[in-house]
């Protein structure tokens, strides 16, 4: 602000100028300039977003729908119109349904325990605590790691012969599990990675919301004879509903786009298949396979659009479900 | 914080903060007993363990890793492992690391710059259509970018950007979330009187942005920058689709390392450790701001 003092002040200039004609003109010019500045500046400031988003965000989105209605291969020069053929193919494509099942399964395994655990952690962190910052930092440390690196580390932890997980399980008499081999085992392992990474983040979000609950509500509940559990279910959870909704929707959007973790959990050059029997291939991986392995852009676009609609529907369903949660209080 | 935040959330921030702080100490429920500390310590250990294990393996030889019980203490082989990693002709690890710094750095600077500018315009400058345009931006946040993966790729083919770092930088220079976040913050943190005073002094709008708005929104801009950097550093699907193996980001170098047919785990883990190091550095330096960012964002929901 100190530099502003040296800026010429338009209103003060005319008084000092002897010529009666020039100050008016100068003043008018300054006024015009500042008026133009006022009018144009906002548009100039928001233009970068709209220009770049239009080119790289909106256009691809609309274009996806267009491509999905064509028989569109990267290599061929012609892309004949095919109407809803791609979507018809999709309905009878067992690989698509398999990927949808895998995605939904991993989503449930990754979201439900994650949010429950996050709620539990938040209620612990919400107590009078020594080393508060340390514990908060420790729960979100997994966020500050590279997804690719973590996926590689976990696939080693889950390796059949020398992995720590099997070694620990072996200590209680469980035979070595080949985690990548079956649906349930690979889903669980991949869901564990997701949970490890995001539980702390959700816990902090819940913690922030819990701290915004006025204390007298708890005191009133305690006076009415509500114990700790009842206070939690009757005061905390209903008041946290908007926050729970937020985390559920964020998890839905993220969960249905799961790609890196299952890809790197499987090894080899066709890891995008999610294992030899496609045990852990997600929808995002199937989109990728169709686009960048088979170069069938039309079909890949159809799968991508269906994925988008599924995300919207799943978010809406979750919205309704969470709105019911504790709704009759 | 993204979907449910009220558009007209223009409460005065300093007082809101003060209120929040006094509430914070008031709302803590009960004192933590030994059981709480035990559970939290266990949680902390589980958080740290995979990372610790990563650094252990990165400092060991392959013989030690392939044995049971698993090794849990660091060894002295880090230098050899890193040497093999840097000598790996397929992974282009150093180039990947440099590319990631370049990509994440430029995306972060641009997102912060454009978001603070647009946020200022939406919060403090009256203009025709501002409400509709802001709603448009909020709507864009609900759209996953992955959906446009294929046309974006077709676009890159047309532009000749396949395999070029431009392909992973230019589309990400703006962020709807960033604009919205800075709009919310500017509305409460930038004082109207100061802007008015600067106008009376004859400041141009750009000058006001630079001298009044930027200093006031610095805390939020820092959080936005941190999140953008971490997210860009981690991006996988798009770089994996559009870049080539010889011009990778560091995440792609890791993917190349791990998809090899031989498994030199010591080398792979040296790579994962090095690729994680910059993020850990950011975390150690700015951990408190990250916590603040998550919790403040949650409260806006």
Image (spheres, coloured by chain):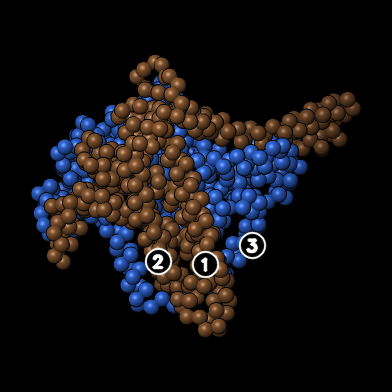
Chain colours: A brown, B blue
Q: Position of residue A298 (x, y in %)?
A: 40, 27
Q: In front here: B114 or A277?
A: A277
Q: In which quadrant of the rendered view does residue B33 lie?
A: bottom left
Residue at (42%, 36%) from the top-left corner? A304
Report if residue A159 is visible in the image. Answer: yes
Q: In front here: A217 or B85?
A: A217
**Mark 3 and mark 1, same subunit?**
no
Q: Are marks 3 and 1 in contact (CB under 8 Å)?
A: no
Which badge, 1 or 2, is on the more N-terminal residue?
2
What is the spatial separation of the Cα atoms under label 3 and label 1, in whole angstroms?
Answer: 32 Å
Q: Which residue is mark 1?
A: A326
**Chain ID, mark 3:** B
**Chain ID, mark 2:** A
Residue at (40%, 66%) from the top-left corner? A121
Q: Secondary structure at mark 1?
A: loop
Label 3: few (<14), some (14–19) or many (≥20) C-alpha neighbours in 10 Å? few
What is the spatial separation of the Cα atoms under label 1 and label 2, in whole angstroms?
Answer: 21 Å
Give the side of residue B130 with respect to residue A185, left or right.
right
Give the side of residue A108 with respect to residue B126, left or right.
left
Q: Nearer the viewer, mark 1 or mark 2?
A: 1
- In the image, farthest residue toward the right: A20
Q: Residue A121: which disc?
A: 2
Q: In which quadrant of the rendered view does residue A327 lie?
A: bottom right
Q: Residue B15: which disc?
A: 3
């Amino acid at each position: 602000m100190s530099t502003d003092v040296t800026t010429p002040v338009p209103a003060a200039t005319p008084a000092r100028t002897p010529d009666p004609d020039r100050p008016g003109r100068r003043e008018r010019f300054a006024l015009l300039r500042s008026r133009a500045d006022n009018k144009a500046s906002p548009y100039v400031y928001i233009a970068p977003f709209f220009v770049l988003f239009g080119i790289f965000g909106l256009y691809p989105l609309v274009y996806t729908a267009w491509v999905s209605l064509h028989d569109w291969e990267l290599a061929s020069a012609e892309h004949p119109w095919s109407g809803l053929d791609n979507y018809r193919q999709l309905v009878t494509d067992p690989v698509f349904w398999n990927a949808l099942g895998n995605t939904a399964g991993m989503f449930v395994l990754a979201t439900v325990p994650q949010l429950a655990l996050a709620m539990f952690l938040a209620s612990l962190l919400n107590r009078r605590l020594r080393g508060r910052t340390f514990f908060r930092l420790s729960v979100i440390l997994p966020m500050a790691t590279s997804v690719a690196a973590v996926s590689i580390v976990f696939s080693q932890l889950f390796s059949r012969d020398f992995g720590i997980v099997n070694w620990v399980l072996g200590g209680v008499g469980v035979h070595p599990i080949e985690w990548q081999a079956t649906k349930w085992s690979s889903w669980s392992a991949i869901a564990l990675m997701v949970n490890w990474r995001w539980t702390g983040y959700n816990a902090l979000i819940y913690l922030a919301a819990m701290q915004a609950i006025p204390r007298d509500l708890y005191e009133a509940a305690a006076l009415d004879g509500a114990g700790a559990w009842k206070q939690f279910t009757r005061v905390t959870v209903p008041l946290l509903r908007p926050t729970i909704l937020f985390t559920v929707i964020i998890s839905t959007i993220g969960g249905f786009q799961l790609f890196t973790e299952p890809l790197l959990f499987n090894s080899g050059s066709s890891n995008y298949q999610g294992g030899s029997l496609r045990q852990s291939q997600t929808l995002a991986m199937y989109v990728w396979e169709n686009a960048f392995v088979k170069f069938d852009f039309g079909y890949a676009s159809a799968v991508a659009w269906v994925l988008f609609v599924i995300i919207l529907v799943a978010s809406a369903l979750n919205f309704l479900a969470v709105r019911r949660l504790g709704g009759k209080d | 914080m993204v979907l449910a935040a009220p558009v007209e959330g223009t409460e005065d921030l300093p007082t809101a903060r003060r209120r929040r702080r006094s509430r914070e100490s008031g709302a803590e429920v009960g004192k933590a007993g030994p059981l709480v500390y035990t559970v939290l310590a266990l949680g902390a250990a589980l958080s740290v363990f995979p990372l610790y294990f990563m650094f252990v393996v990165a400092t060991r030889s392959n013989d030690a890793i392939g044995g049971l019980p698993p090794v849990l203490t660091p060894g002295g082989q880090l230098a050899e492992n890193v040497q093999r990693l840097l000598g790996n002709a397929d992974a282009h690890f150093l180039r990947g690391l440099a590319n990631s710094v370049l990509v994440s750095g430029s995306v972060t600077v641009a997102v912060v710059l454009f978001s603070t500018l647009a946020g200022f315009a939406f919060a403090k400058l009256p203009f025709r259509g501002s409400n509709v345009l802001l709603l448009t931006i909020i709507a864009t946040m609900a759209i996953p970018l992955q959906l446009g993966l294929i046309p974006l790729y077709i676009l890159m083919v047309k532009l000749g950007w396949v395999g070029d770092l431009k392909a992973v930088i230019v589309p990400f220079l703006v962020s709807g979330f960033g604009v919205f976040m800075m709009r919310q913050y500017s509305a409460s943190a930038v004082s109207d009187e100061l802007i008015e005073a600067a106008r009376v002094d004859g400041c141009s709008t750009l000058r006001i942005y630079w001298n009044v708005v930027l200093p006031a929104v610095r805390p939020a801009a820092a959080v936005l920058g941190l999140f953008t950097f971490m997210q860009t550093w981690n991006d996988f699907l798009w770089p994996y689709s559009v870049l080539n193996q010889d011009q990778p980001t560091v995440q792609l170098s890791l993917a190349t390392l791990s998809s090899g047919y031989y498994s030199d785990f010591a080398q792979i883990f040296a790579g994962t450790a090095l690729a994680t190091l910059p993020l850990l550095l950011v975390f150690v330096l700015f951990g408190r701001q990250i916590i603040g960012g998550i919790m403040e964002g949650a409260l806006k929901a």
